[in-house]
Amino acid sequence: MELLAGLAILVLLLSLIVPVAVAVRHSTRRRRASVEVRLLTQALNAYHLEYGRWPRSEHGTVDLSWTNCTALIRALTADPVLNPRRIVFLEIPTESLADGTWMDPWGRSYLAAVDGDGDGVVHMELPPGFGPPVTLDIPNEKAVVLSGGADPRKESEWIRSWAP
């Protein structure tokens, strides 16, 4: 009987602790993503300030939207082809990189876009995992970065570098 009472107390304690631990983990991931989104946005703007243009891909075309940030990350981390002055605009922890792409805390690539045509609006193309294909038009920004958060299909989960 005492063993059963002890087990009941243990189950009760676990039922109180587990939801708190899950909430703390979710909050920590969101905070980390928010910091990383801000860092990537600042690095993009610093690159533009230094070179007078946005990072280019290996083929020399201006990318307006990156859904896989490999070339972008190389440009911001001193790649000699994409960043000829080899200025480190961004330092990324190796545990956050997967095949050259900076991954958010949920294991997905950050999305980035810039105002390549200078019209004062950033056009960000969202990939299929964000629900139906759509292009976001974000006014009054030069560079924006987005993490889909825990569930990219829910806009309320997004961590963005601009005010919604």
Image (cartoon, grey):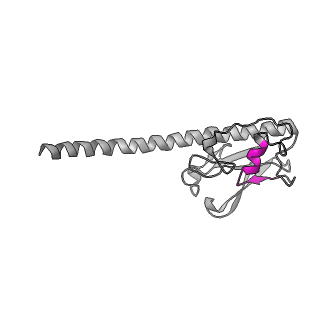
All told, the count of numbered labels is 0
Query: Foreground residue, 98 or 152?
Result: 98
Is residue 51 visible to the viewer in this orientation of the structure? yes
User: Quick check: 35 above or below 149?
Assistant: above
Q: Residue furthest left?
A: 1
47 on left or right of 91: right
Quarter of the rendering containing residue 91? top right
Quarter of the rendering containing residue 87? top right
In the rendered image, residue 111, in percent from the top left (x then y), is placed at 69, 51
Quarter of the rendering containing residue 151? bottom right
Query: Foreground residue, 5 or 100?
Result: 100
Query: Foreground residue, 83 or 148?
Result: 83
Q: Is residue 70 magenta?
A: yes
In the rendered image, residue 99, in percent from the top left (x then y), is placed at 67, 51
Q: Is residue 46 magenta?
A: no
Query: Foreground residue, 7 or 54?
Result: 7
The residue range painted magenta reads 63-75
Q: Residue at x 23, y 42 (%)?
A: 9
In the rendered image, residue 154, in percent from the top left (x then y), is placed at 56, 55
Q: Residue at x 61, y 60 (%)?
A: 129
User: Quick check: 160 above or below 89?
Assistant: below
Is residue 139 visible to the viewer in this orientation of the structure? no
Q: Residue at x 79, y 52 (%)?
A: 64
27 on left or right of 76: left
Q: Residue at x 85, y 47 (%)?
A: 118
